[in-house]
Image (cartoon, rainbow, N blue to C red):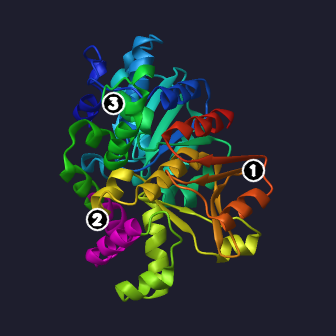
């Protein structure tokens, strides 16, 4: 095992030279702030959205800026088959033996894909309670975190990593738009809506990357994990979800199209949500309305959606993007008398998205009559400042 752990932690022997990684300052600052907390910091999100890269950036910060002894920093990917059969605690014990570290010395642990480990939550609790350690962990499975995180109540903080937003996309593309060139924003933004925010795809433009990524998630995180034998049904299901992104999802209609039972369709829908490929938005209203009403679907990444459905319906793509920007505000959609308003956030901000278009009279009446602290109409990219202000206020 020693050789494997040295491969994962090259900074133990040589100067740490991370790849030429482009930073995501906003989320990186949040993770740096968490260094001072004893809580286990868990990064969640879609596969290859950048969780491992963020961990490596924190490691570089510890070594370069905080001057932490590299031997006190330990990284491992727990989905490595070479470590199968070894518990988290056994792996950490081996790490301590390698460097002869006693339990009084504070160590920094970075545990990638932690949910691959059986009883991971109990082991993290043990580390939290008994060791002088700051733990960062990651997971690409929401279902496991939801079912187990009670064991870590009060001991963890969960941070979701989303695909790049438009500002980060420009940064990755090394595009700087001067104020005098503001007229170029629209064309760059439409490029972004077509490409999406998966970091590697933004940098390489390799369209096969997105297909392989979705196939990988469907086969490994859904079919293999849940024991679904018909992978093609899952692929067809996902295509239907992408075609319906931004719309209310009818379980019965999807079940009829795929010739499966409504119960199966409901289970598959949750599987896709738990793998972070889609997000589900409930209807605003009383508890029974929220639970019984159909949910709206949004794609986790615009590029994936465009790959499967083509670059059309820009208004729906723009609405999808706005949802991703306000996701942390726990939005609901509003439906009343046959009319719909896109979002009402938990802090009572009402948002309607109309990309270069106008509301109908009935929709405008509903928008005006709903009680809300703030009301925002988003018509184009220049209205995104209103959303950015909401993010800052959160």
Q: Is residue 207 left or right of residue 245?
A: left
Q: What is the x, y in percent for residue 282? A: 62, 65
Q: Is residue 363 visible?
A: yes
Q: Earlier in the sequence, mark 2 or mark 1?
A: 2
Q: Which residue carries the number 2 mark?
A: 219
Q: Is residue 332 left or right of residue 136?
A: right
Tell me where residue 214 sits by quadrant: bottom left
Does the magenta stretch mainly form a helix, a strand or a loop?
helix
Read off the magenta span: 216-243
Residue at 35 percent of width and 42 percent of height: 192
- Circle 2 sits in a helix, a strand or a loop, which is it? helix
Vertical order, 269 against 351 (above or below): below
- Circle 1 sits in a helix, a strand or a loop, which is it? loop
Q: Which residue carries the number 1 mark?
A: 348
Q: Which residue carries the number 3 mark?
A: 172
Please state which of residues 11 and 130 is positioned toward the viewer in this rendering.
Answer: 11
Q: What is the x, y in percent for residue 151? A: 62, 52
- Circle 3 sits in a helix, a strand or a loop, which is it? helix
Vertical order, 161 against 338 (above or below): above
- C-alpha gap between disc 3 and disc 1: 33 Å
Tell me where residue 202 sits by quadrant: top left
For discs 2 and 3, the disc positioned in front in the rendered view: 3
Q: What is the x, y in percent for residue 266? A: 49, 77
- C-alpha gap between disc 2 and disc 3: 29 Å
């Amino acid at each position: 095992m020693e050789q494997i752990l040295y491969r994962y932690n090259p900074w133990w022997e040589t100067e740490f030279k991370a790849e030429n990684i482009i930073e995501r300052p906003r989320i990186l600052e949040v993770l740096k702030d968490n260094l001072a907390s004893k809580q286990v910091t868990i990064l969640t999100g879609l596969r290859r959205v950048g969780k491992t890269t963020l961990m490596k950036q924190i490691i570089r910060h510890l070594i370069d800026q905080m001057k932490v002894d590299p031997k006190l920093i330990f990284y491992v990917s727990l989905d490595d088959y070479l470590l199968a059969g070894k518990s988290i605690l056994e792996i950490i014990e081996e790490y301590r033996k390698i460097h002869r570290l006693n339990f009084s010395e504070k160590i920094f642990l970075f545990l990638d894909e932690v949910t691959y480990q059986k009883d991971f939550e109990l082991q993290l609790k043990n580390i939290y309670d008994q060791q002088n350690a700051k733990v960062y962990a990651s997971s690409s499975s929401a279902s496991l975190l939801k079912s187990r995180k009670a064991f870590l109540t009060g001991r963890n903080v969960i941070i979701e990593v989303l695909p790049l937003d438009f500002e980060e996309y420009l940064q990755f593309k090394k595009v700087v738009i001067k104020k005098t060139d503001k007229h170029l924003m629209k064309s760059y933004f439409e490029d972004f809506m077509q490409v999406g925010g998966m970091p590697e795809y933004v940098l390489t433009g390799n369209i096969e990357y997105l297909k392989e990524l979705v196939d990988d998630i469907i086969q490994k995180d859904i079919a293999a994990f849940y024991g679904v034998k018909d992978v093609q049904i899952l692929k067809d299901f996902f295509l239907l979800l992408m075609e319906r992104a931004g719309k209310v999802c009818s379980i019965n209609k999807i079940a009829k199209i795929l010739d499966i039972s409504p119960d199966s369709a409901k289970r598959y829908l949750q599987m896709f949500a738990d793998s972070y490929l889609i997000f589900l938005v409930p209807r605003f209203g009383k508890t029974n309305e929220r639970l019984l009403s159909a949910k709206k679907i949004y794609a986790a990444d615009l590029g994936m959606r465009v790959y499967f459905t083509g670059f059309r319906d820009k208004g729906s793509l723009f609405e999808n993007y706005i949802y991703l920007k306000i996701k942390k505000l726990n939005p609901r959609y509003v439906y009343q008398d046959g009319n719909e308003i896109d979002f009402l956030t938990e802090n009572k901000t009402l948002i309607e998205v109309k990309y270069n278009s106008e509301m109908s009279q009935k929709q405008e009446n509903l928008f005006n009559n709903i009680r809300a602290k703030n009301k925002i109409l988003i018509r184009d990219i220049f209205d995104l400042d209103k959303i950015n202000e909401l993010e800052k206020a959160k």
